[in-house]
Amino acid sequence: MIQRIQTVYLLLVAILSAVTFFLPIATIVTPANVFDLSCRGFVATPPIDALHSSTWALSLVNILIPVIALGTIFLFKRRRLQLVLSYINFLLMDAYYVIVIITLWFADQQLATSSHWIYHYAFIFQIINMILTFLAIRAINKDEALIRSLNRLR
């Protein structure tokens, strides 16, 4: 299981996604306050209760990505299912960015002041995860092609 390169790729996906859960993703800067967005919600500096925006979808997607990646590692004998789960994980990573942008936009509309967004380095982690998932999909396809060629020789 660990001898296969896709295991390393998927393990890195799980680790980066787990780290993303605890780091701030983006910041909304207004003239009066700074709001940090993480998967746990918005945190205001100085502390106020002005922004009520739900981040449950962001949290759910960010929990599903490492769970699916870890589950995919242990399905090493079922390569077709590994491929399907990797594609689903890739789509969840796309959904992550859509949810972040929508959450920031709705929060910005709720604040109704001039503001700008700043993305943190944790925002890039899902792009790295997409690349790693793509590499894992290629490696799984290579394994599948190798197995088919060995079955042809029998």
Image (cartoon, grey):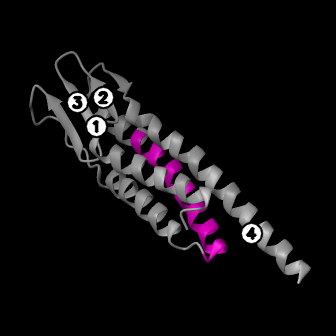
Whole-Å distance between the Cαs marked 3 and 2? Answer: 5 Å
Q: Which residue is mark 2?
A: 27
In the rendered structure, which amino acid carries the disc numbered 2? Thr
Q: Which residue is mark 1?
A: 37
- Mark 4 or mark 2, whichever is nearer to me: 4
Identify which residue is drawn at 26% across, 27% down: 112
| Contact check, label 3 and label 2, Cβ < 8 Å | yes
**Farthest residue, direction top:** 31
- Mark 4 or mark 1, whichever is nearer to me: 4
Residue 144 picture location, percent across and down: 74, 69
Q: Quadrant of residue 65?
A: bottom left
Residue 39 picture location, percent across and down: 29, 46
Tag 3's secondary structure? strand
Vertical comparison of 120 with 90: above or below: above
Q: Please name whichever residue, 15 or 32, is drawn nearer the observer in this view of the structure.
A: 15
Vertical comparison of 13 with 119: above or below: below
Vertical comparison of 57 with 50: above or below: below
Identify which residue is drawn at 56% across, 66% down: 85
Residue 140 picture location, percent across and down: 67, 63
Secondary structure mainly formed by the magenta segment: helix
Q: Which residue is mark 3?
A: 35
Q: Please name whichever residue, 24 or 115, is drawn nearer the observer in this view of the structure.
A: 24
Residue 52 horizontal side relative to residue 21, left or right:
left
| Contact check, label 1 and label 3, Cβ < 8 Å | yes
Give the magenta part as a residue range: 77-100
Q: Which residue is mark 4?
A: 144
Whole-Å distance between the Cαs marked 1 and 2? Answer: 6 Å
Q: Is residue 21 magenta?
A: no
Tag 1's secondary structure? strand
Label 1 or label 2, whichever comes before in sequence order: 2
Label 4 or label 1, whichever comes before in sequence order: 1
| Contact check, label 1 and label 2, Cβ < 8 Å | yes
